[in-house]
Image (cartoon, rainbow, N blue to C red):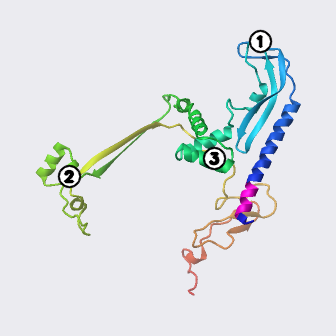
Amino acid sequence: MTHAQLEDLLGARMREVTRQLFQDHLTLRARDEVRREEVVDSAGVGRSRIERGRRRRLATVFGKVTVARIAYRGGRVAHLHPADAVLNLPERMHSHGLARLAAIESSRGSFADACERINAVTGAGIGHRQVQELAVSAAADIDAFYDALVPAPCTDATPLVLSVDGKGVVIRPEALREDTAKAAAAKGGNAMKNPAGVRGETRQETDGRPGSRLRCRARAAHSRRHHRRPRPAGRRPRRGARAPPGAEGPVEVVVRFGARHRRAGGVRRVRPGRAPRPRAPPSLGRPGRRGPPPD
């Protein structure tokens, strides 16, 4: 057995092991389900009788499983299954995981390719029509999603930001408007005087202006709220800062220099109540004194 055959065998068996774990969990939940005292629907109609072990199929990304639960029955009304709401089961057979895969894969290509990829990864055996129905149902609330993104109206205290930009786009001579083409012909413009782009020519000579560009303008307006930056919990020790009162022992004060003249370690030890005097790097020398001896 080659390693490729071993991978395929283990992949299929591990998927079956996971499906069996899923099934065992559902079986334990059905065994431990307790009867509810009072079950009514949205119209207020109660259910007085129960039926244990009512089953339904569920297709998951690991395979198909069976869900058993208590069905609450009544006269001439539909059965109710509170366990379905606890598990958040879909109305149809396919799970939410398969619906998510169908929506993702359908957006990348055709439904046939999506069906093939889903079956190759999960082994669920889903059909072409089921993939199409799941993708359509996933987009059912797209209008409500975009309606929720509508921003709230601004108040008088909200600043309004305006952004305007313009850019000249080179237009081919035959694509110019009639009035622009006449004006360009009268001025002798819109002729590619330097088609090879000879270096040293001016930009006006290179792109054939005047009359060769169309000004495009973009405008944007949006509101902006004030955001205050949170103050840092601790401040960096400044050069020349004094040690805190009541401190015991030496205090470490970090003195930072430029990248080229950073001292080794960058830490100086001072006594409590005293502050280190700022010192210039040795390589720069000090005013009124001789600089460091040459190498």
What's under tag 1, amino acid-wise? Gly
Q: Main secondary structure of the magenta part?
A: helix
What's under tag 3, amino acid-wise? Ile
Q: Residue furthest front?
A: 1
Q: Which quadrant would the C terminus be assigned to in this image?
A: bottom right
Give the camera-side residue of 233 and 287: 233
Q: Element under label 3?
A: helix
Q: Which quadrant would the N terminus be assigned to in this image?
A: bottom right
The mark that comes first in sequence, 2 or 3, is 3
> Is any atom of residue 250 visible in this view?
yes
Residue 117: image location, x then y, percent: 61, 49
Query: In this figure, which residue is indicated by the disc labeled 2?
Result: 173
How far apart are labels 3 and 1 at the CA level? Answer: 42 Å
- Residue 75 got which mark? 1
How far apart are labels 2 and 3 at the CA level? Answer: 53 Å
The mark that comes first in sequence, 3 or 1, is 1
Residue under the image location 50 percent in, 33 percent down: 158
- Location of residue 2 with respect to 14 vertically, above or below: below
- State which region is magenta: 4-11
How far apart are labels 1 and 2 at the CA level? Answer: 81 Å
Is residue 6 on the magenta stretch?
yes
- Residue 118 got which mark? 3
Residue 4: image location, x then y, percent: 70, 63
- Location of residue 272 with respect to 57 vertically, above or below: below
Q: Give the crowd class for mark 3: few <14, some 14-19, many >=20 residues within 10 Å.
A: many
Q: From the viewer's perspective, is 198 left or right of 26?
A: left
What's under tag 2, amino acid-wise? Pro
- Residue 134 got which mark? none
Contact between marks 3 and 1 (CB within 8 A): the answer is no
Q: From the viewer's perspective, is 25 left or right of 270?
A: right
Residue under the image location 70 percent in, 58 percent down: 242
- Location of residue 171 with respect to 162 vertically, above or below: below
